[in-house]
Amino acid sequence: KGIERELICPACKELFTHPLILPCQHNVCHKCVKEILFAFEDSFADGGSESSNQSSPRIKISSSSMDRIDRISRSASQRRSFGWRGRKRNSLTPRSSLFPCPGCQRDIDLGERGINGLFRNFTLETIVERYRQAARAAIAIMCDFCKPPPQESTKSCMDCSASYCNECFKIHHPWGTVKAQHEYVGPTTNFRPKILMCPEHEMERVNMYCEICRRPVCHLCKLGGCHANHRVTTMSTAYKTLKEKLSKDIEYLISKEGQVKAHITQLDLLLKEAECNSERAKEEACQSFEKLSHVLEEKKSAALRAIEASKNLRLEKLQMQAEEYQGLLENNGLVGYAQEVLKETDPSCFVQTAKQLHVRIQKATESLKSFRPAAETTFEDFVVDIAKQEEILGDLSFHSNGLEIPEINEEQSRMYNKALISWESPGKTDSADTYVLEYHKLNREEESVTWQEIEVCSKSKIISDLDDDSSYAFRVRGYKGSVCSPWSREVILRTPPAPVFNFLFDDKCGYNSELNTRRTSVESRAGFPLLLGSERMQVGCYTTLDYIVGDTGIAKGKHFWAFRVEAYSYLVKVGVVSSNKIQKLFHNTHDVTSPRYEQDSGHDSGSEDAFFDSSQPLTLVTLGMKKFFIPTTPAAPKDPASRILPLPSSLGICLDCDKGKVGFYDTGRMKCLYECEVDCSGIMYPAFALMGGAAVHLEEAVTAKYGEYHDDI
């Protein structure tokens, strides 16, 4: 009875039936594996996992496992295309081969063969059968061949996979025949094959053990299969080695029985302590919520009293006003009284009474002409604003001092075609199981902030569909069960000023530049090749720049692209060039850079800058020696030192063809360093120029490999 927990399938929570060994070495029933795969496929078809358990009543998949299925499905959709859309529901074989192990939650990929590539655990199956027989000792196994009524069986034939009584066994296994040599055991319902066959090569028996994959293999697997380069050993050697290790480990555990019992006693005490502490925590939580409830009740009572007092005062005023207007009716109130006064014939008495009455009649006449209610009927002043309190109560949760606050890594986070937000935990202990990332757009016009929430299983997340040229605030918190950490420090990142423009370097680069195979990096090398190239140019004391352009042009709209310049680069120019000036660019022998451009040359380069900018067939700025040089313009500072900025780690260019402007940005802060007008009459191309030792790398677009699917891939 004590080993029953070892014989329970982690999926169906029942005794194993035809258990299969998964690659992670856990065992699952054959039927459970199929149902998990079907449930996994249904999670694709239904767009979620809420209904995936309904078609498999036998299997019990926890919510954490279904969350795992959702995450795996997102990862798998990036790598392969499943055929579930055309599968009939009554199909006997699931088409998916990827699912989370019910025992350890690891992602299991069964490969092309699927379930057929798994070994059946006959040893575990035999142990389960012995357990079943011990549990139902009173229930006999009947003979399969007796005429009704069948007799109780006395033995089972492993070759015939049937049970016999003594008489039937003699009839079906006569002496002197082949059947007489069959192997028989005591009565059983578990018939296992004598020889374990290879699931990859069904006609071959397994005779070796792969030490890398930890599974039996046949000689074909070793010769040309997936285990060809793996270290293998003979089955007898593996049997002897593993049996010795298992025996030693069992002997060690048995020798430590006293220590195990001491740990059990300690765990029993911890169980009682946890029970008591949980009750204490419940009481403290109840007290906290009762305090909140008491405060709310007091606020509620005060608000209701104020509303009631205001209501009574307003009703009183309106009632008095109604009575006054009621008196203006004929034969009623003030008018009726005045009518009676008019009947007075004695002048002295009439004048004495009518003077005061006439004042009241005049006031009534004026109020009738400009009617205004004596009190307001709306109670807008008594509307309770609970927006901030709702947000605070929404964040109300258990805070753990042991769960550290995650920190957003601003160096690894990126804002480009998409936003990549990465974070890390300061310590290595008590790491969170899941994280919640929140973000919102910074807008001065909006008084209330609405955070958008995303639940993440990894430590990074890619966010799409953010507005261009906008700032966003991000924060993250960790969750471990029902316990959560406080929010991290808010980090503000800004999106590019325009949609990201994707291009590669054109393969027709300069004589001294080299492209990588992906055409995302260009490098020029100083030295002998540069001297050979200079010999072919009639430039005197000048050195020709090596130009390269992008392979895609821009005809209209606003676009942004980014790149990195290596810190060792001597001189690099970046900008844009028009299609009708490209030929002039590559054939312009006077396109030169003078030594007078060097910062330490001692020359005043202002006049030369003006001449250089006006004569160039493209718009560019100069970079080099870890500096960013702002071109000389009427609006630029006159002091040369103020036109030299530190070179950012990443630069961006924003081209607005509609307005005819080009801007140069520090992409880390998305701050514009320099902007000028440009002639966009033709198709515009990104342009780069290098001289000496220099290198430029285009920024790669943010894709799934940077973020949440990195671990799965």
Image: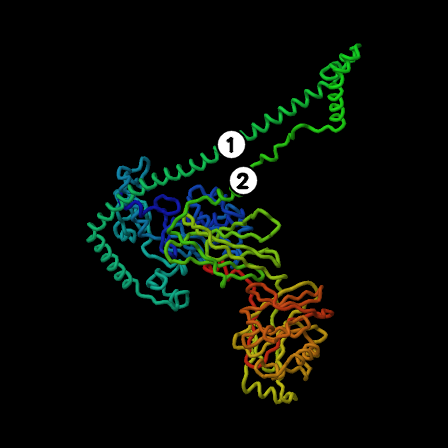
x, y percent for residue 348 = 78, 13
- Residue at point 71%, 76% (across, down): 581
Give the left or right position of residue 176, taking residue 344 as reference: left
x, y percent for residue 6 = 31, 48
Is residue 549 something that shows in the picture? no
Most extreme residue toward the front, as rendered? 348
Total numbered labels: 2
In the picture shown, does residue 568 fall above or below 668? below
x, y percent for residue 466 = 59, 56
Q: Secondary structure at mark 1?
A: helix
Query: Which label is found at residue 386?
Result: 2
Is residue 694 something that shows in the picture? yes
- Which image quadrant is residue 590 in? bottom right
- Residue at point 30%, 65% (across, down): 234
Q: Residues within 10 Å of mark 1 (few under 14, many from 20)?
A: few
Q: Amino acid at mark 1?
A: Ala
In the picture shown, does residue 100 fall above or below 676? above
Q: Secondary structure at mark 2?
A: loop
Q: Residues within 10 Å of mark 2 (few under 14, many from 20)?
A: few
Out of 308 and 509, give the one closest to the viewer. Answer: 308
- Residue at point 61%, 89% (across, down): 535
Earlier in the chain: of badge 1 and badge 2, it is 1
Out of 650 and 522, give the one closest to the viewer. Answer: 650
Question: Is there CB contact under 8 Å for labels 1 and 2?
Answer: no
Q: Give the residue pinned by disc 1.
A: 302
Out of 597 and 18, give the one closest to the viewer. Answer: 597
- In three-dimensional space, the C-alpha distance between marks 1 and 2, rounded to whole angstroms, equals 15 Å
x, y percent for residue 670 = 58, 63
Q: Amino acid at mark 2?
A: Ile
Q: Nearer the viewer, mark 1 or mark 2?
A: 1
In the picture shown, does residue 248 fall above or below 174? below
